[in-house]
Image (tube, rainbow, N blue to C red):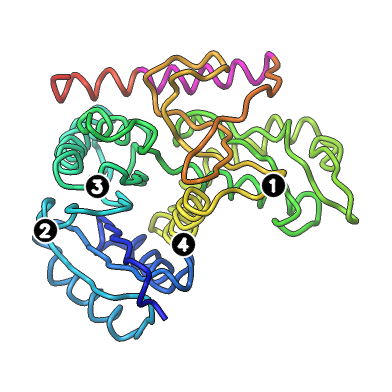
Amino acid sequence: MFLHVQALRVCVTGAAGQIAYSLLYSVAKGDVFGKDQPIILTLLDIAPMMGVLEGVVMELQDCALPILQEIKATADEREAFTDIDVAMLVGAMPRREGMERKDLLKANAKIFQSQGKSLDQYAKKTVKVVVVGNPANTNALIAMKCAPSIPKENFSCLTRLDQNRAKSQIAAKCSVPTSGVKKVTIWGNHSSTQFPDAMHAVVVKDGKDTKATEAVNDDAWLKGDFITTVQKRGAAVIAARKLSSAMSAAKAICDHVRDWVQGTTDGDWVSMGVISDGNTYGVPEGLIYSFPVTLSGGKWTIVDGLSVDAFAREKMDITAKELIEERDAALEFIGN
């Protein structure tokens, strides 16, 4: 049934890690690109992880998935990125105990400088890139800067996990399924300075669209615990599991790329970290900043015209300031 459909080449980095372990099965069974779209997977990780990665390859083979045509495991960026259509850059240097933030930035700047250059040299110029490895916004910016032949709009970072977390909090508060919560926005950095914003969100209750502010009917919660719960959710998962979010991160990556490829539903938007150039919200240019976007035909468009009150303005500026500091430090490390 796939005779006339060209296979998509999809690369996942950090492919021996726990996020990829949840992600790869979903991608390979059609949750992202469709049940009739053949897939060639290239799996990239560092050389010491090749033994583990071979086990992942064996498991994917043993799933006998109809659309998975081929799997390649490698520690070589050229082999991983050649002619790919989509790059899911999950792998990054994790923050270790006692490590300063600037040390983390420096280590990851080098990784994403190398991967950006390799994407520039070997990937298709139409490649869509989502960066997951933290600090995701700044890592995406570094990769973008090092791949000048690929359009800036083709680089993004994952803030869909934060959006999904925010949706679930509002859904629980209003006693509705998450499908009944729309237009939740994450502004800024995928960090504890992010601004989860429900002021323009809609809750569908008893078949009717209601403003989230009215459905929740608790302004103190929306401006307090709601925001801090989403901001600190990753840390809460680590405290409980002793491991970082994996299943939920993988689901969010699938959501992010699926909507980028297939489009957003009418009457809703999603959050993506994208280049801030030309935005109408007073966010400085030259950042990868999370905005509300709609997607169609493989392209994103920032949702314009949303009102920004003094509370939101302050939150949006705080997270922009952090991103400027991260950007300037990272660019210094790579001599750009």
The amino acid at mark 2 is Ala
Q: Which residue is mark 3?
A: 124
> In the image, residue 151 lies at what x, y percent?
32, 33
CA separation, marks 3 and 1? 30 Å
Q: Which residue is mark 1?
A: 266
- Does residue 272 lie above or below 43 as drawn? above
| Camera-side mark, 1 or 2 | 1
- Does residue 134 lie above or below 263 as drawn? above
300 vs 110, left or right, is right
Q: Residue at x 86, y 52 (%)?
A: 205
Q: Which residue is mark 4?
A: 32
Q: Residue at x 28, y 57 (%)?
A: 12
Tell me if residue 323 is in the magenta stretch: yes
Q: Main secondary structure of the magenta part?
A: helix
On-image quarter of the N terminus: bottom left
State the SS at label 3. Answer: loop
State the SS at label 4. Answer: loop
> In the image, residue 250 lies at what x, y percent?
43, 59
Q: Which residue is mark 2?
A: 75
Q: Which residues are magenta?
A: 310-324
- Determine which quarter of the picture holds residue 36: bottom left
State the SS at label 2. Answer: loop
State the SS at label 1. Answer: loop
The amino acid at mark 4 is Val
| Camera-side mark, 3 or 4 | 3
CA separation, marks 2 and 4? 25 Å
Which of these two is toward me, 102 or 171?
Answer: 171
The amino acid at mark 3 is Lys
